[in-house]
Image: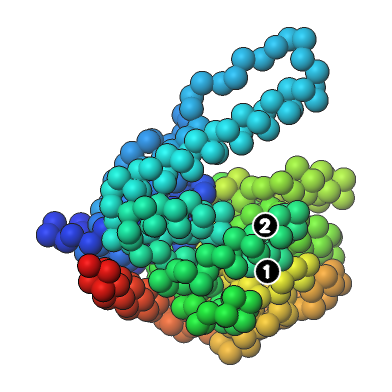
Amino acid sequence: MTDGHGFKPARPDSDVTVSMLVCNPFLNDARVRKEAETLALAGYQVTVHALALPGVTPRFEVLESGVRVQRHGASEAKPARQSGASKRERSRREVLALVASRGRALISMAWSTFRARPDIVHAHDVNMLPTAWLAARLARAALVYDAHEISTDREGYRSFRGAVGWIEKQLVPRVAGMITTTDARAKFFARAYGVSRPLVLQNRPRLVKVEGANRIREELGLSEPWPIVLYQGGLQPGRGLERLAKAAAKVPEAYFVFIGGGSQADELQLLVKASGLGGRVRFIDTVALDELPFYTASADIGVQPIENTCLNHFTTDSNKLFEYVIAGLPVVATRLPEIRKVVQHHDLGLLVPPGDTEALADAIRTLVQAPDLCRRYQANAEKAAQSLNWETQEASLLELYHRVLGANTTTERASQ
């Protein structure tokens, strides 16, 4: 695999520091990693503050790109279990322990960031925005907010939409710079909070070239010469995955492979088993970011069957769509505005209505049975990959940082 992107350490004389805050262990967060690496390679001293995962993640590490990672919370000690406690009581205690652990992690992040006195604090998503705002205020640093999602109308967030909306309404107008993932989301944030349109950085992967990959077929022992239909990403509700599993029954002589983990993993595997499709529909657990391109490139068709269940889904274009493009795969994807814009503009594959199992199966079957059509879409994907990659967006991120630094310097001088 080649990417033409040799990592070099940040310049040792650089004195501009950045603290990024993210609410996950920073193991497979491609977007945060790419932003941090871009800044580090441009000379910024970047520290990513993430959540600790005992026994899995080191507390401190330095990536090849020079990005420092510090993880917080999640003590190794486990709460003692009382044999007489009921299942409900144990569940309540586990929830309280989780909340307490997360609270300690956020306090630790804020304190560590304040002590570092960074020039810029960068909040990744709304769950880190209050902590990042507090740390930036105490450290007198500029605040950048990257809204990965529209969390006021998002799967799994409906119970918190009021709180999320209040937080963003209070804090978004105060940030020095804002980033999001699609044009539709940028328009939403600008209108919802009366701010300038955020910078759009799509969830594109780096431009990598994987040759001769056969990872999926070898790992799963797929003996038939059938094409591999791939879905990669979180196995979560609202992503059309049950429909994709059901569509497999209508597309013979093709393998269907799901790569990823999530709350629907067990449900999907039970569905496949009950349907008698276990020989053709297979599952691979979450794959490390550096290994994922080998898996993607070893498939033949990429599928994005997301459903229109919320505004967040309606406005997405999804990282997996761009990962399929970089790998040169023809795609079958849901006809939602941002996805349609990418697929139609570059002629990458077939679009289907959201929530339509028959249409999804028909589109996949069309590609399986039409090698010439697949080759056309593959060629178009290879061309599109030259523009739909992360490298073409790096300058925009750096320009935003230059503006934020300039504005913060002016503000500091005015306050003196």
Residue 282 image label:
none
Q: Position of residue 34 (x, y in %)?
A: 40, 62
Q: Left or right: 365 with respect to 16? A: right
Q: Which of marks 1 and 2 is in front?
A: 2
Q: Mark 1 points at which residue?
A: 312
Q: In this view, does 179 lie above or below 91?
A: below
Q: How crowded is mark 1: few (under 14 residues within 10 Å), some or many (20 or more)?
A: some
Q: Give the amino acid at mark 2.
A: Ala
Work out how far the residue at label 1 is from the one at label 2, CA to CA, in angstroms.
Answer: 17 Å
Establish if 95 lies above or below 153: above
Q: Can residue 392 be seen here?
A: yes
Q: What residue type is labelled 1?
A: Asn
Secondary structure beneath label 2: helix
Q: Which mark is on residue 163?
A: 2
Residue 100 at x, y = what percent?
58, 33
Q: Give the residue at x 52% y 65%.
A: 171
- In what element is the residue under mark 1? helix
Is 299 positioned to the left or the right of 307 in the image? Answer: left
